[in-house]
Amino acid sequence: MKARVTANAAYAVADIDKRLYGSFLEHLGRAVYTGIYEPGHPQADAEGMRKDVIELVRALDTPICRYPGGNFVSAYNWEDGIGPKENRPRRLDLAWRTTEPNLVGIHEFADWAEKAGTEMMLAVNLGSCGLDEARAFVEYVNHPGGSYWSDLRAKNGRTQPWNCRLWCLGNEMDGPWQVGHKSASEYGHLANETAKALRGLDPTVELVVCGSSHSNMPTYPQWEATVLEATYEQVDYISLHMYFENYEKNTAEYLALPAKLDRYIGTVAGIIDYVKAKTRSKRDVKISFDEWNVWYHQRKLDAERMRAWDWPEAPRLLEDIYNFEDVLQVGCIINTFIRRSDIVRIACIAQLVNVIAPIMTDPGGGAWRQTIYWPFMLASKHGRGTALQLAVEVPTYDAAAADKVPWLDIAGVHDSNVGTLTFFAINRHGSETIEADVALERFAAKSIEHTIIRHDDLEANNTKDAPDNVSPVKGNGAALSSKGMTLNLPPHSYSMVRVIL
């Protein structure tokens, strides 16, 4: 299969916000307990945080981590997680039908985030709580001192404020499953009033208002229009969420789903423009795609298990075991974000450890990288700079998600600071190699590097006993040419090609 790609230095989409490669940790299953926190573990530090997990997170170079939820936050009292641990209450979590011991709260998470080399993206509870609790939380975290909540923070061991910049105004408030679910007009009013209060307390914060939980919601896209009309002058981002499934075991249909993601982003971008015009605003609101991942391997089974159990503490829940096919999907998803980086400024893979996550742990044992760790890490490390508007000519196929889905999914990023041009390329085809001629216009290439992830078995995964079964290796499918470069992309493969300028 032949393809032609043109990359021109003058045709840029946007400078990529590094927070496009964000992450997410929720008090859900083993994400926190025996995930990042396990006192008594051989790798635990003095605060009980697993150093092996911290090392794997640092290697991802994920700039932000959203916390503490997720569905969990909509019935969470943040005050339960401060003060002496022996005095903290045990609570029943309605979102996941589990018991929360509150051994990890804002102090512990903030300390972990610093060790892991990431910044906090915090969420306030606008489900069971409201404006006043949100205001108190921001004051506790960000105010220097001399007030009730900031002085209480100092009393609890942290004199200096954390100065968290990014705050989510609740989570998935369009969802009937959410504790404190609201209509768009109810939520829009509450979010606007909360945003005004938080800005009065700290004008430097960036605020994320809830958009649709997914594009199949019956209230989508009217939800976005109603909420943005109520909040446009007070918020900086609207959140979107999407998970990807392959219950039918149809790889071509599965890998076409990012076309639906692209359409979702484009629709909400249009609504943002509409509301901006309607409100006569000069402000720009962007998208925070702060939950995304593959999620289907354990989903139906876990839904049944949750209904049957009796409030366990940190059970195994949503622990999808990812395969090589999911590497291709995650690569396509991230490429979509790169190509839409003018409007998608923040994105968070959901989640980070154990729960639909790139990192897995054994209680008392080791930690290892799932298959999807690798495309996320490669993009996070090498997808910084300016996203390019590529011209791509390649055969296509029709799928349920969209017609004319290109067999080659490719994104390009120019990093002028480092002097590199990086391409992330996925061959969606299961039997044909793609031979691509890539024209490099206004770029002077010196050398080229090819990294590839490929496996003959789409179901291949990584385990604690075979942690590198699916992992990147040096490829030989890229070469410089008189006009740019040539790529030889095997069937069902993920490639990263770096051109040194």
Image (cartoon, rainbow, N blue to C red):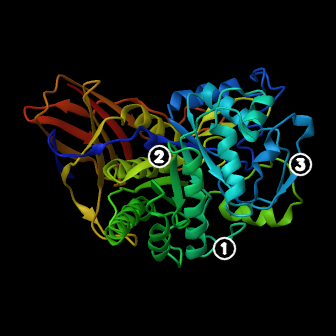
Quarter of the figure with residue 43: top right
| Mark 2, secondary structure of its residue | helix
Horizontal side of 179 relative to 212 (left or right) equals right
**Residue at mark 2:** 327
Q: Is residue 292 visible?
A: yes
Horizontal side of 119 relative to 232 (left or right) equals right
Indicate the amino acid at tag 3: Arg
Indicate the amino acid at tag 2: Val
Give how far across and how far down residue 115 sits, in percent. Answer: 63, 25
**Residue at mark 1:** 176
Graded by Cα atoms within 10 Å as few (under 14), some (14 to 19) or many (20 or more), the crowding at tag 1 reads few
Question: Which residue is at a point 16% across and 38% down the rendered structure image?
Answer: 9
Question: Which residue is at a point 86% across and 53% down the rendered structure image?
Answer: 91
Graded by Cα atoms within 10 Å as few (under 14), some (14 to 19) or many (20 or more), the crowding at tag 3 reads few
**Residue at mark 3:** 90
As drawn, 317 above or below 52: below
Of the 4 image quadrants, the one containing the C terminus is top left
Give how far across and how far down residue 406 sits, in percent. Answer: 28, 59
| Mark 3, secondary structure of its residue | loop
Graded by Cα atoms within 10 Å as few (under 14), some (14 to 19) or many (20 or more), the crowding at tag 2 reads many
User: Disc 2 versus disc 1: distance between alpha carbons?
Assistant: 32 Å
Horizontal side of 132 relative to 421 (left or right) equals right
Question: Which residue is at a point 56% across and 75% down the rendered structure image?
Answer: 185
262 or 16, which lies in front?
Answer: 16
User: Disc 3 versus disc 1: distance between alpha carbons?
Assistant: 26 Å
First along the sequence among labels 2 and 1:
1
First along the sequence among labels 3 and 1:
3
Indicate the amino acid at tag 1: Pro
